[in-house]
Image (cartoon, grey):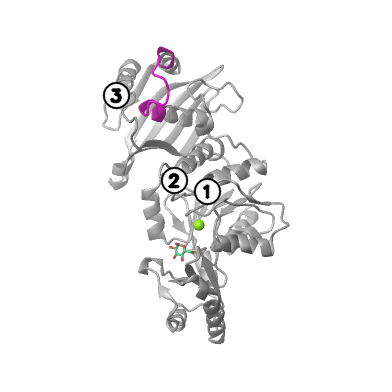
Amino acid sequence: MIVSDLDHTMVDHHDTENSSLLRFNALWEASYRHDSLLVFSTGRSPTLYKQLRKEKPMITPDITIMSVGTEITYGKSMVPDDGWVQILNQKWDKNIVIEEASKFPELTPQAETEQRAHKVSFYVKKDKAKQVTEALSKILEQRGLDVKIIYSGGVDLDILAQGAGKGQALAYLLKKFETEGKLPGNTLVCGDSGNDAELFSIPGVYGVMVSNAQEELLQWHAENAKDNPKILHASERCASGIIQAIGHFKLGPNLSARDVSDIVHVQNDENASPRHEIVRFCLLNEKWRRAEVENSELLISGLKAAIHPSAIFVHPSGADHNIKEYINIWEKVYGDKQGKQFRTWVDNVLATQISSDTWLVKFDKWELHGEERHGCVISSILRKDTNWFTLMHAHQTWLEQSSQNEWIF
Ligand code: GLC
Ligand code: MG
């Protein structure tokens, strides 16, 4: 299980190409999606979380923890954990928090979307943070509340129910998994700022502070966890730091398809799987259109060999093409995205073996063209022939439209 913060950890806001995030996505979908859990743990409210998903090429986590560990949801449809809400109601009264905090002129309220049932948030200058935190904790305690005040990013001050926070939310999940007999083999937590500190104090977990971690987190580490060999301060930024930690702690595969220099030729290793093939195929398409692979006879004949002669490609418009037509269309778009912003990634890869040598692979494929993005859900059939996989069929449907439609039986 990976539990990762988003801003400046999974998502690098200084990387306009999103290269580390895309590296991580390809690694996760090919090597981890099928048997591991991805948890995003963010300070953002559901509103700002959804906004980030629109701005950045992000894959779908199994569990989303939002508003600094005060809201836990499951799956794509984000089903809330009501049990967690019950726990947070103890010794918490949002109105009293607002009433007392508003008496501090140093505190500027954050946007309305960021004020949540168990989280009240402000901005405060660095030099005032400590003093305000101490005074406010005392007053709220006198008023019978049990709260937790967290300072992050050198600017954000969150007042939470005492039982909340990213660490407590993770502890709650781990306990739940344990009762269900589904405890993950290893857990890696990833963060960069103050509200992530708690994640690193959960017993038994591995942790990575990305290279660009904030002063407040590094300071917390120096004071509380300096001698813990399971915590790494990565030398790489954001999602690349996460991949670095996977390698450092030997938690599993750490080679992303985006790190392989030759993606044209199938690597004949035991790691080959239908999931790897799908990730490789989509990446090849990106590199083809960006003219980052050579436009050669060899590549085309290799592609032909990887597709069954009677394979059919059903386009989202409903048009279908045989392999010859499909390759003709594909050859013409070589380099059409050269020098432009064009990226592709796959999400929710699910491979189901349907016979001794055949898999049904369903996945979402996204294309980012500058500001615009298009998504398809694809059902494909792959067959294993001694050393490689052959694509037998692919059916694509637009993602956005399908979500707007009524249920179709
Ligand atoms: C996110 C939230 C904000 C919070 C901050 C730190 O930026 O939007 O409300 O204060 O994280 O936890
Ligand atoms: Mg962060």
- The answer to whether residue 261 is visible is yes
Q: Nearer the viewer, mark 2 or mark 1?
A: 2
Query: Is residue 296 in the magenta section?
Result: yes
Q: Amino acid at mark 2?
A: Asp
Which segment did they paint magenta? 285-299
Mark 3 falls on what kind of element? strand
x and y percentages locating residue 262 in the rendered image:
51, 24
Q: Nearer the viewer, mark 3 or mark 2?
A: 2
Quadrant for residue 79, please give it.
Answer: bottom left
Closer to the N terminus: mark 3 or mark 1?
Answer: 1
Cβ–Cβ under 8 Å for marks 2 and 1: yes
Crowd around label 2: few <14 · some 14–19 · many ≥20 (10 Å): few
Please name whichever residue, 322 or 127, is drawn nearer the observer in this view of the structure: 127
x and y percentages locating residue 408 in the rendered image:
30, 42
Residue 49 marker:
none
Q: CA distance from mark 3 to mark 2?
A: 38 Å
Quadrant for residue 213, please give it.
Answer: bottom right
Mark 2 falls on what kind of element? loop
Q: CA distance from mark 3 to mark 1?
A: 41 Å
Q: Residue at x 43, y 27 (%)?
A: 284
Crowd around label 3: few <14 · some 14–19 · many ≥20 (10 Å): some
Crowd around label 1: few <14 · some 14–19 · many ≥20 (10 Å): many
Q: Amino acid at mark 3?
A: Asp
Instruction: Give the residue at mark 1.
Output: 238
Please name whichever residue, 229 or 309, is drawn nearer the observer in this view of the structure: 229
